[in-house]
Image: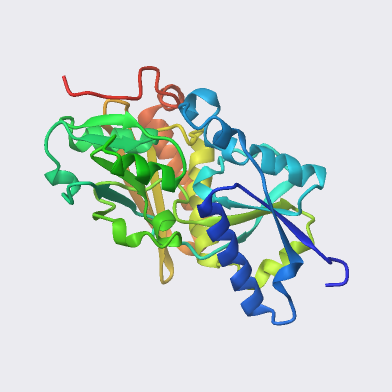
Amino acid sequence: MSELQKIVVGIRSSNLSKSQTNLLIQEVLKQDPNLHKDVFNIKTIKTTGDVHNTHRLDQIGGKGLFIKEIEEQIISGKIDIGVHSMKDVPAQDVYPDLDIICWMQRHKPNDALISNSGKSFMDLPAGSVIGTSSIRRRSQVLNLRKDLSIKLLRGNVDTRIQKLRNNEYDAVILSLAGLSRLNLDHLVTEVLEHNLFLPAACQGAVGVQALKSSKVKKILAPINDLQTQTECMAERRVLKNINANCNSPVSIYANINKNNITIQFEIFDHHGNKILKKSKEDLKENCVKLCDELSEEIINTVGQTKINELDNLKSDFDYTPS
Protein backbone atom coordinates (compact mmCIF):
# COMPACT_ATOMS: atom_id res chain seq x y z
CA MET A 1 0.00 0.00 0.00
CA SER A 2 3.01 2.30 0.06
CA GLU A 3 2.19 3.73 -3.38
CA LEU A 4 -1.46 4.29 -2.37
CA GLN A 5 -1.75 6.05 0.98
CA LYS A 6 -5.32 7.20 0.32
CA ILE A 7 -8.05 6.10 -2.06
CA VAL A 8 -10.42 8.97 -2.81
CA VAL A 9 -13.89 7.60 -3.57
CA GLY A 10 -16.36 9.78 -5.44
CA ILE A 11 -20.06 9.09 -4.87
CA ARG A 12 -23.44 10.78 -5.09
CA SER A 13 -24.77 12.27 -1.86
CA SER A 14 -27.78 9.92 -1.62
CA ASN A 15 -28.20 7.45 1.23
CA LEU A 16 -28.18 4.63 -1.32
CA SER A 17 -24.79 5.71 -2.72
CA LYS A 18 -23.38 5.89 0.80
CA SER A 19 -24.79 2.48 1.71
CA GLN A 20 -23.40 0.84 -1.43
CA THR A 21 -19.99 2.39 -0.84
CA ASN A 22 -19.93 1.24 2.78
CA LEU A 23 -20.74 -2.30 1.64
CA LEU A 24 -17.90 -2.12 -0.88
CA ILE A 25 -15.40 -0.96 1.75
CA GLN A 26 -16.54 -3.63 4.20
CA GLU A 27 -15.97 -6.33 1.58
CA VAL A 28 -12.50 -5.01 0.74
CA LEU A 29 -11.49 -4.86 4.41
CA LYS A 30 -12.71 -8.43 4.95
CA GLN A 31 -10.41 -9.63 2.18
CA ASP A 32 -7.35 -7.67 3.31
CA PRO A 33 -6.95 -7.38 7.11
CA ASN A 34 -3.87 -5.19 6.59
CA LEU A 35 -6.04 -2.42 5.17
CA HIS A 36 -7.76 0.12 7.43
CA LYS A 37 -11.03 1.86 6.60
CA ASP A 38 -9.24 5.24 6.90
CA VAL A 39 -7.49 4.40 3.62
CA PHE A 40 -10.78 5.27 1.92
CA ASN A 41 -11.61 8.97 1.75
CA ILE A 42 -15.23 9.39 0.63
CA LYS A 43 -16.08 12.53 -1.33
CA THR A 44 -19.71 13.31 -2.16
CA ILE A 45 -20.27 14.91 -5.55
CA LYS A 46 -23.44 16.66 -6.70
CA THR A 47 -24.28 15.36 -10.15
CA THR A 48 -26.42 17.04 -12.80
CA GLY A 49 -29.03 14.29 -12.31
CA ASP A 50 -29.27 15.17 -8.61
CA VAL A 51 -29.46 18.93 -9.20
CA HIS A 52 -32.23 18.68 -11.82
CA ASN A 53 -34.32 16.32 -9.72
CA THR A 54 -37.72 17.40 -11.00
CA HIS A 55 -37.00 17.15 -14.74
CA ARG A 56 -37.50 14.14 -16.98
CA LEU A 57 -34.10 12.50 -17.40
CA ASP A 58 -34.69 11.64 -21.07
CA GLN A 59 -35.17 15.35 -21.82
CA ILE A 60 -32.00 16.57 -20.09
CA GLY A 61 -29.51 13.91 -21.13
CA GLY A 62 -30.46 10.55 -19.64
CA LYS A 63 -29.24 8.59 -16.65
CA GLY A 64 -25.61 9.30 -17.56
CA LEU A 65 -26.19 12.61 -15.76
CA PHE A 66 -25.89 10.69 -12.47
CA ILE A 67 -22.24 9.90 -13.19
CA LYS A 68 -21.01 12.76 -15.42
CA GLU A 69 -19.33 14.87 -12.73
CA ILE A 70 -17.87 11.78 -11.04
CA GLU A 71 -16.32 10.63 -14.32
CA GLU A 72 -14.87 14.11 -14.90
CA GLN A 73 -13.23 14.08 -11.47
CA ILE A 74 -11.67 10.65 -12.12
CA ILE A 75 -10.26 11.90 -15.43
CA SER A 76 -8.88 15.06 -13.79
CA GLY A 77 -7.29 13.06 -10.95
CA LYS A 78 -9.37 14.65 -8.17
CA ILE A 79 -10.72 11.24 -7.16
CA ASP A 80 -9.41 7.70 -7.70
CA ILE A 81 -12.64 5.75 -8.13
CA GLY A 82 -16.39 6.25 -8.51
CA VAL A 83 -18.99 3.85 -7.11
CA HIS A 84 -22.08 3.57 -9.31
CA SER A 85 -25.40 1.81 -9.54
CA MET A 86 -24.59 0.21 -12.88
CA LYS A 87 -28.05 0.68 -14.35
CA ASP A 88 -27.22 4.42 -14.31
CA VAL A 89 -24.09 3.94 -16.44
CA PRO A 90 -24.77 4.23 -20.20
CA ALA A 91 -23.60 1.31 -22.33
CA GLN A 92 -21.85 3.73 -24.69
CA ASP A 93 -18.56 4.81 -23.11
CA VAL A 94 -17.95 8.56 -22.96
CA TYR A 95 -14.34 8.31 -21.78
CA PRO A 96 -12.24 5.49 -23.35
CA ASP A 97 -9.64 5.83 -20.57
CA LEU A 98 -12.18 4.76 -17.93
CA ASP A 99 -13.27 1.23 -17.07
CA ILE A 100 -15.38 -0.66 -14.55
CA ILE A 101 -12.52 -2.19 -12.58
CA CYS A 102 -14.68 -4.09 -10.06
CA TRP A 103 -18.18 -5.56 -10.00
CA MET A 104 -19.78 -6.26 -6.64
CA GLN A 105 -22.01 -9.33 -6.42
CA ARG A 106 -25.36 -8.46 -7.93
CA HIS A 107 -28.41 -8.34 -5.71
CA LYS A 108 -31.77 -9.59 -7.02
CA PRO A 109 -32.46 -7.38 -10.06
CA ASN A 110 -36.27 -7.35 -9.71
CA ASP A 111 -38.46 -4.31 -9.52
CA ALA A 112 -40.60 -3.92 -6.40
CA LEU A 113 -44.02 -2.38 -5.84
CA ILE A 114 -44.87 -0.42 -2.71
CA SER A 115 -48.55 0.46 -2.45
CA ASN A 116 -50.34 2.47 0.24
CA SER A 117 -53.26 0.04 0.16
CA GLY A 118 -51.11 -3.09 0.43
CA LYS A 119 -52.63 -4.34 -2.84
CA SER A 120 -50.47 -6.08 -5.46
CA PHE A 121 -49.95 -4.58 -8.93
CA MET A 122 -52.70 -6.58 -10.65
CA ASP A 123 -55.14 -5.90 -7.78
CA LEU A 124 -54.74 -2.11 -7.70
CA PRO A 125 -58.08 -0.37 -8.40
CA ALA A 126 -58.53 1.17 -11.86
CA GLY A 127 -57.30 4.77 -11.94
CA SER A 128 -54.67 4.20 -9.22
CA VAL A 129 -51.71 6.54 -9.62
CA ILE A 130 -48.36 4.78 -10.14
CA GLY A 131 -45.14 6.72 -9.58
CA THR A 132 -41.99 6.06 -11.62
CA SER A 133 -39.39 7.98 -13.61
CA SER A 134 -38.43 5.04 -15.82
CA ILE A 135 -39.43 4.97 -19.49
CA ARG A 136 -39.11 1.16 -19.36
CA ARG A 137 -41.38 0.77 -16.33
CA ARG A 138 -43.89 3.18 -17.85
CA SER A 139 -44.20 0.98 -20.95
CA GLN A 140 -44.41 -2.19 -18.86
CA VAL A 141 -47.23 -0.74 -16.73
CA LEU A 142 -49.14 0.26 -19.87
CA ASN A 143 -48.55 -3.17 -21.39
CA LEU A 144 -50.26 -4.83 -18.44
CA ARG A 145 -52.77 -2.22 -17.28
CA LYS A 146 -53.87 0.74 -19.36
CA ASP A 147 -56.50 1.48 -16.70
CA LEU A 148 -53.84 2.84 -14.29
CA SER A 149 -52.56 6.42 -14.20
CA ILE A 150 -48.81 7.05 -14.40
CA LYS A 151 -47.20 10.10 -12.84
CA LEU A 152 -43.54 11.13 -13.03
CA LEU A 153 -41.66 10.51 -9.79
CA ARG A 154 -38.10 11.83 -9.34
CA GLY A 155 -35.82 12.11 -6.31
CA ASN A 156 -33.87 9.66 -4.17
CA VAL A 157 -35.49 6.57 -2.61
CA ASP A 158 -36.38 8.35 0.65
CA THR A 159 -38.01 11.23 -1.23
CA ARG A 160 -40.04 8.87 -3.40
CA ILE A 161 -41.33 6.89 -0.44
CA GLN A 162 -42.23 10.10 1.39
CA LYS A 163 -44.24 11.30 -1.63
CA LEU A 164 -46.07 7.97 -1.61
CA ARG A 165 -46.85 8.30 2.09
CA ASN A 166 -48.09 11.86 1.44
CA ASN A 167 -50.68 10.26 -0.87
CA GLU A 168 -49.31 11.97 -3.98
CA TYR A 169 -49.27 8.44 -5.44
CA ASP A 170 -51.14 5.21 -4.73
CA ALA A 171 -48.12 3.04 -5.48
CA VAL A 172 -44.52 3.37 -6.64
CA ILE A 173 -42.17 1.00 -8.45
CA LEU A 174 -38.54 0.94 -7.28
CA SER A 175 -35.50 -1.31 -7.51
CA LEU A 176 -35.63 -4.17 -5.01
CA ALA A 177 -31.83 -4.05 -4.66
CA GLY A 178 -31.86 -0.37 -3.71
CA LEU A 179 -34.55 -0.93 -1.08
CA SER A 180 -32.66 -3.92 0.30
CA ARG A 181 -29.38 -2.00 0.59
CA LEU A 182 -31.22 0.69 2.54
CA ASN A 183 -32.83 -1.96 4.79
CA LEU A 184 -36.27 -1.00 3.50
CA ASP A 185 -37.31 -4.46 2.28
CA HIS A 186 -40.10 -4.51 4.84
CA LEU A 187 -41.91 -1.79 2.88
CA VAL A 188 -42.21 -3.94 -0.25
CA THR A 189 -45.77 -4.93 -1.10
CA GLU A 190 -44.82 -7.16 -4.02
CA VAL A 191 -41.64 -8.30 -5.73
CA LEU A 192 -42.43 -7.98 -9.45
CA GLU A 193 -41.42 -11.13 -11.29
CA HIS A 194 -39.49 -11.13 -14.56
CA ASN A 195 -42.37 -12.49 -16.64
CA LEU A 196 -44.16 -9.16 -16.00
CA PHE A 197 -41.34 -6.70 -15.32
CA LEU A 198 -38.07 -7.81 -16.89
CA PRO A 199 -35.43 -5.48 -15.39
CA ALA A 200 -33.17 -2.84 -16.87
CA ALA A 201 -29.62 -3.72 -17.87
CA CYS A 202 -27.38 -4.13 -14.80
CA GLN A 203 -30.20 -3.49 -12.33
CA GLY A 204 -29.06 -4.62 -8.87
CA ALA A 205 -25.36 -4.35 -9.73
CA VAL A 206 -22.82 -1.94 -8.26
CA GLY A 207 -19.62 -1.17 -10.15
CA VAL A 208 -16.41 0.69 -9.38
CA GLN A 209 -15.13 2.98 -12.13
CA ALA A 210 -11.55 4.17 -12.48
CA LEU A 211 -8.83 4.86 -15.01
CA LYS A 212 -7.85 1.67 -16.84
CA SER A 213 -4.33 2.17 -15.49
CA SER A 214 -5.50 2.56 -11.86
CA LYS A 215 -3.49 0.76 -9.17
CA VAL A 216 -6.70 0.39 -7.13
CA LYS A 217 -7.80 -2.47 -9.41
CA LYS A 218 -5.35 -4.82 -7.65
CA ILE A 219 -6.81 -3.94 -4.23
CA LEU A 220 -10.40 -4.53 -5.41
CA ALA A 221 -9.64 -7.71 -7.40
CA PRO A 222 -10.49 -10.11 -4.52
CA ILE A 223 -14.09 -8.85 -4.32
CA ASN A 224 -14.76 -8.73 -8.07
CA ASP A 225 -17.68 -11.07 -8.81
CA LEU A 226 -17.01 -12.73 -12.14
CA GLN A 227 -20.57 -13.96 -12.67
CA THR A 228 -21.97 -10.46 -12.14
CA GLN A 229 -19.31 -9.02 -14.44
CA THR A 230 -20.06 -11.51 -17.22
CA GLU A 231 -23.84 -11.14 -16.98
CA CYS A 232 -23.80 -7.34 -16.82
CA MET A 233 -21.23 -6.93 -19.57
CA ALA A 234 -23.43 -9.14 -21.76
CA GLU A 235 -26.45 -6.92 -21.10
CA ARG A 236 -24.41 -3.79 -21.81
CA ARG A 237 -22.94 -5.27 -25.00
CA VAL A 238 -26.39 -5.92 -26.47
CA LEU A 239 -27.57 -2.39 -25.60
CA LYS A 240 -24.43 -0.93 -27.15
CA ASN A 241 -24.78 -3.05 -30.28
CA ILE A 242 -28.37 -1.95 -30.92
CA ASN A 243 -27.64 1.66 -29.88
CA ALA A 244 -30.23 1.66 -27.11
CA ASN A 245 -29.79 3.71 -23.94
CA CYS A 246 -31.25 4.33 -20.49
CA ASN A 247 -34.15 6.23 -22.06
CA SER A 248 -35.25 3.30 -24.22
CA PRO A 249 -38.24 1.12 -23.25
CA VAL A 250 -35.91 -1.90 -23.23
CA SER A 251 -35.51 -4.73 -20.70
CA ILE A 252 -32.61 -7.17 -20.71
CA TYR A 253 -31.44 -9.77 -18.24
CA ALA A 254 -28.55 -12.22 -18.56
CA ASN A 255 -28.28 -15.16 -16.19
CA ILE A 256 -25.55 -17.77 -15.84
CA ASN A 257 -26.64 -21.21 -14.68
CA LYS A 258 -23.75 -23.69 -14.39
CA ASN A 259 -22.07 -23.66 -17.83
CA ASN A 260 -24.83 -21.86 -19.73
CA ILE A 261 -25.84 -18.21 -20.10
CA THR A 262 -29.37 -17.13 -21.02
CA ILE A 263 -30.21 -13.61 -22.20
CA GLN A 264 -33.82 -12.40 -22.11
CA PHE A 265 -34.76 -9.26 -24.02
CA GLU A 266 -37.92 -7.19 -24.47
CA ILE A 267 -38.60 -3.91 -26.25
CA PHE A 268 -41.84 -1.90 -26.10
CA ASP A 269 -43.26 1.15 -27.76
CA HIS A 270 -44.32 4.09 -25.60
CA HIS A 271 -47.96 3.00 -25.65
CA GLY A 272 -47.07 -0.24 -23.89
CA ASN A 273 -47.20 -2.51 -26.92
CA LYS A 274 -44.53 -5.22 -26.83
CA ILE A 275 -42.58 -5.01 -30.09
CA LEU A 276 -40.26 -7.95 -29.49
CA LYS A 277 -39.62 -10.58 -26.83
CA LYS A 278 -36.57 -12.78 -27.33
CA SER A 279 -34.55 -15.27 -25.31
CA LYS A 280 -31.31 -16.96 -26.35
CA GLU A 281 -29.03 -19.43 -24.60
CA ASP A 282 -25.54 -20.77 -25.18
CA LEU A 283 -22.46 -21.94 -23.31
CA LYS A 284 -21.10 -19.08 -21.21
CA GLU A 285 -17.79 -19.32 -23.05
CA ASN A 286 -19.72 -18.24 -26.17
CA CYS A 287 -21.14 -15.19 -24.40
CA VAL A 288 -19.81 -12.53 -26.80
CA LYS A 289 -21.01 -14.48 -29.85
CA LEU A 290 -24.43 -14.95 -28.22
CA CYS A 291 -24.72 -11.20 -27.51
CA ASP A 292 -23.82 -10.30 -31.09
CA GLU A 293 -26.25 -12.86 -32.55
CA LEU A 294 -29.07 -11.57 -30.34
CA SER A 295 -28.25 -7.96 -31.26
CA GLU A 296 -28.34 -8.80 -34.95
CA GLU A 297 -31.71 -10.53 -34.59
CA ILE A 298 -33.13 -7.52 -32.71
CA ILE A 299 -31.95 -5.06 -35.34
CA ASN A 300 -33.18 -7.26 -38.21
CA THR A 301 -36.61 -7.68 -36.60
CA VAL A 302 -37.24 -4.22 -35.14
CA GLY A 303 -35.04 -2.07 -37.39
CA GLN A 304 -32.33 0.34 -36.26
CA THR A 305 -34.43 3.36 -37.23
CA LYS A 306 -37.29 2.20 -35.01
CA ILE A 307 -34.94 1.51 -32.08
CA ASN A 308 -33.45 5.01 -32.45
CA GLU A 309 -36.93 6.55 -32.53
CA LEU A 310 -37.81 4.84 -29.23
CA ASP A 311 -34.84 6.42 -27.44
CA ASN A 312 -37.01 9.31 -26.29
CA LEU A 313 -40.64 9.74 -25.33
CA LYS A 314 -41.93 12.61 -27.44
CA SER A 315 -45.17 13.15 -25.52
CA ASP A 316 -45.90 13.83 -21.85
CA PHE A 317 -44.60 11.19 -19.41
CA ASP A 318 -47.77 11.31 -17.28
CA TYR A 319 -50.58 9.07 -18.46
CA THR A 320 -54.27 9.13 -17.58
CA PRO A 321 -56.66 6.44 -18.86
CA SER A 322 -58.99 7.80 -21.52
The quarter of the displayed image where residue 48 is located: top right
Q: Position of residue 224 (x, y in %)?
A: 60, 67
The quarter of the displayed image where residue 146 is located: top left
Residue at horizontal 52 percent and vertical 46 percent from the top? 236
Q: Quadrant of the C terminus?
A: top left
Q: Quadrant of the N terminus?
A: bottom right
Report whether residue 273 is seen. no
Q: Residue furthest bottom?
A: 33
Residue at horizontal 31 percent and vertical 36 percent from the top? 131
What's the image's color scheme? rainbow
Residue 284 as seen in the image, left or right of residue 51: left
The quarter of the displayed image where residue 180 is located: bottom left
Q: Residue furthest front?
A: 166
Report whether residue 85 is seen. yes
Q: Is residue 230 above or below residue 130?
A: below
**Camera-side residue: 127 or 221?**
127
Residue at horizontal 84 percent and vertical 67 percent from the top? 5
Q: Position of residue 68 (x, y in %)?
A: 65, 37
Q: Is residue 220 above or below residue 63?
A: below
**Camera-side residue: 62 or 261?**
62
Residue 100 as seen in the image, left or right of residue 128: right
**Camera-side residue: 16 or 100?**
16
Residue at horizontal 27 percent and vertical 49 percent from the top? 114
Q: Is residue 45 above or below residue 176?
A: above
Residue 315 as seen in the image, left or right of residue 48: left
Q: Position of residue 92 (x, y in %)?
A: 59, 38
Q: Is residue 62 above or below residue 122?
A: above
Give the mark count: 0
Q: Position of residue 6 (x, y in %)?
A: 80, 63
